[in-house]
Amino acid sequence: MIKLLLVDDNKIVREGIKDLFSEETSVELLAEASSGLEAIEMLKTISPDVIVMDISMPELDGLETLSIIKKQYPEIQILMLSMFNNRGYVEEAFAAGATGYLLKNSHSNVLFQAVVSVYSGMYFIDPDIQSEENTFSGRLH
């Protein structure tokens, strides 16, 4: 079972994702956080396999939170969730240690596929972002 932490400042987004995974027996949503600071604090008491995290959050944005988490917990796979379909954000996320990047307007089955991929040691990039120029596919080292 994949243990998941969901981090997004938008409660409606968190509720929607929580509903998507409620029927999925291979994923357990351990907790949800409304900020990067809250997520970092939660990691003192929970051990998720995968974190699904929004890029755009107040106080400590997703990219800053990603950097902090990867330094302290390098074994956790992080899937960035964003409304930004921008190569610059994608590159920045992967450079900071993300193992996946998914657009918020993706279909629910793509979200599940992304979680399973990063958990399995594969990089994942939203199919709507991929182009011949992107080289973010393949196995993690």
Image (cartoon, helix red, strand yellow):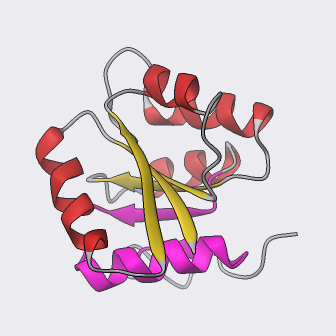
Residue 77 left/right relative to 65: right
Quarter of the image for the C terminus: give it: bottom right
* Residue 121 highlighted magenta (yes or no): yes
| Quarter of the view holding residue 105 | bottom left
Horizontal and vertical percent position of residue 4: 49, 57
Horizontal and vertical percent position of residue 119: 64, 72
Residue segment shown in magenta: 98-126
Q: Residue at x 17, y 52 (%)?
A: 15
Q: Residue at x 40, y 73 (%)?
A: 129
Work out whether residue 130 or residue 33 is closer to the camera in this orientation and state it: 33
Horizontal and vertical percent position of residue 30: 46, 51
Q: Residue at x 36, y 74 (%)?
A: 111
Horizontal and vertical percent position of residue 13: 18, 50
Residue 30 left/right relative to 65: left
Residue 111 left/right relative to 78: left
| Quarter of the view holding residue 18 | bottom left
The image shows residue 98, relative to residue 72, as above or below, that is below
Visible residue check, residue 10: yes
Work out whether residue 104 or residue 84 is closer to the camera in this orientation and state it: 104
The image shows residue 65, relative to residue 139, as above or below, that is above
Residue 67 left/right relative to 2: right
Quarter of the image for the N terminus: give it: bottom right
